[in-house]
Image (tube, helix red, strand yellow):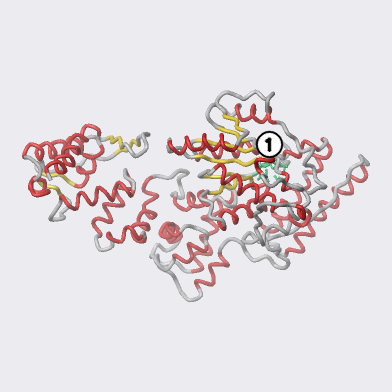
Amino acid sequence: MSTVKFPPGIKVFSKIADFRQWRRGLLLERKTLGYVPTMGALHQGHLSLVQAAKERCDHVALTVFVNPAQFAPTEDLATYPRTLQSDLDKLASLGDGVASAVLVPQVDEMYPAGIDLDVSKQKGTFVEVLGLSNQLEGVTRPNFFRGVSTVVSKFLNIVQPEDVFFGQKDIQQCFVIRNMIRDLHFPTNMHICPTVRDENGLALSSRNAYLTASQKKHALVLSQSLKHMESLYKSGNRNAPALIEAGVNLIEKARQQVETLDEGWKIKLDYVSINSADDLSELKGEIPKQDGCEKVKGIFQQHEYMTELEFESVTTLCSLPRYMNLALFRAIDMLNDQNDQVTFEQFERSWPLLIQEHIKKSSIDDIHSLMYFILKKPESDYLTPDDFLPVLEDIVLNHPALQFLDDNVTFQERYIETTQNILSYKQFYVLYCKLWSLDTDHDLTITETDLTNYNMGAMTRLAVERIIKTGHIAAFADTMVIAEDDPAAIETEISPVVNPLDSLTYFDFICMLFVPEARRAAHILFRVSVVRS
Ligand SMILES: Nc1ncnc2c1ncn2[C@@H]1O[C@H](COP(=O)(O)OP(=O)(O)OP(=O)(O)O)[C@@H](O)[C@H]1O
Ligand SMILES: CC(C)(CO)[C@@H](O)C(=O)[O-]
Ligand code: BAL
């Protein structure tokens, strides 16, 4: 590291303790951190993960570490490309403030008990994800995923990111890490990002540096054979052995071509295999439909149709969070009879329509993209606040902390209206309680009498008048700036509400607490009542 020039704006750490100190600073500033684990030799694939992380988080950190534990004694640990200077320069080229920090730790700090490549001689702590690590890549690299899970769990402990980003290119690695994060309760959200390819279609990979131009050209047979199998599958061929044979045939042709070239290298096929997207188990016969319809069919067996509330089990089986229940139900109902009932036939017809755009545009695991396509209006390519209404409604109906709203439809509506437009749940809750104690007859209007009686007459006449008057000014402001806990403010539009001059409506009350000029009135309201009582 001594000869490496650190680009300004990117912190480079070699000691874990120094990195941790920097990380603590972010926590104190309440900034979020996205994390991209790498083995260095960065290319556009890695940089796309950094960009995805920056879109979601305030700061992005990378680790660059060629992890011995994932290399077999026969593999390329010694020759793996190590290009730190060019890695840092590439990160800097993304622009100021995109990558904030890079940790480049030493092997002995990462493995305090030492790390022997021979697993039978290893000492120390290792993490193994059983059931996912020994098929596919795990056949030729039997200890590879043990090494990956071990080092990623060490890094998740060190980096403590809110979000971590992996490439779909290494799909089995994604499965292993996803289950490890779940099983070990790491408080981190995992994101799987699409594979970045070169202009010819070859997936970018640090080890591509080992390949000649001719080898790169012939390596394209990998994605070509997979695509060929995919198109046969999509046109209705669901027989796993037949699909595999079609893929193997293309690879065999490429193998023969290379043999006739006589360039001193060979294509050797490791495996072609079709595996379940649930648990990576090998699919050997007819492939069941993977679009969610088959799984859901069982639930419909006991029902001719389902209503909104019954639909919850379908939503969960579609891998959606349960607060998406009303949104999913209504999206399907909208594509059908709009009679508040959904039959299996309707689900089977509509679900592929709902997910087709998502599948075209996103990685398989991107649940947020799926939610986006379900929530948005079919004719729009963006979301508007009202698209979130079913989600809010669902939360109000089901969130345990909101059960107090159960019998109070008026306040359910107010809650949805307010949180959708301007407030967080926490903010609404505090204001709701305050309004409830002021508005003693619960007519959603605060009158002078309500204020005068509040807290056993704690407020003076002048204070009451000022509150009512400022409340009216606030209600006519058409832009509100809400200072959240975070200093960054949110701007939102509200429509003015006209109301009698001697009382405040629910919206006056909300505006009054958030419009800057009106905060004085809010101070009077809360301060006077506290001081006097
Ligand atoms: N082409 C790519 N597109 C998107 N992500 C990628 C791509 N290549 C690698 N990644 C992701 O970058 C992260 C770090 O990978 P790594 O440093 O091993 O690079 P690599 O190119 O996969 O290296 P190797 O050639 O050794 O497999 C992993 O999550 C990996 O899936
Ligand atoms: C996740 C990882 C950085 C662990 O060393 C590595 O397996 C990789 O680069 O994909
Ligand atoms: N991207 C996977 C790392 C490895 O093959 O070692």
Split into quadrants, the picture shows ligand 3 in the one at top right
Q: Residue at left 63%, top 51%? A: 174
Question: Taking 369 as reference, is 320 above or below it?
Answer: below
Mark 1 residue's CB less than 8 Å from ligand 1: yes
Question: Taking 486 as reference, is 3 above or below it?
Answer: above
Element type at mark 1: loop
Number of numbered labels in the structure image: 1
Instruction: Judge by depth and name the residue closer to the eye, 60 or 272.
Output: 60
Q: Residue at left 38%, top 55%? A: 390
Query: Farthest residue in the bottom direction?
Result: 302
Is residue 452 left or right of 280 when viewed as pictured? left
Instruction: Judge by depth and name the residue closer to the eye, 158 or 422.
Output: 158
Q: Position of residue 417 (x, y in %)?
A: 29, 49
Instruction: Judge by depth and name the residue closer to the eye, 159 or 232.
Output: 159
Is residue 214 left or right of 66 when viewed as pictured? right
Query: Farthest residue in the left direction?
Result: 461
Question: Taking 454 as reference, is 39 above or below it?
Answer: above
Q: Position of residue 521 (x, y in %)?
A: 17, 36
Q: Amino acid at mark 1?
A: Gly
Q: Residue at left 33%, top 35%? A: 491
Is residue 145 left or right of 26 when viewed as pictured? right
Q: Position of residue 148 (x, y in %)?
A: 67, 49
Q: Which residue is mark 1?
A: 40
Quadrant of the frame with the C terminus:
top left
**Quarter of image, res 490:** top left
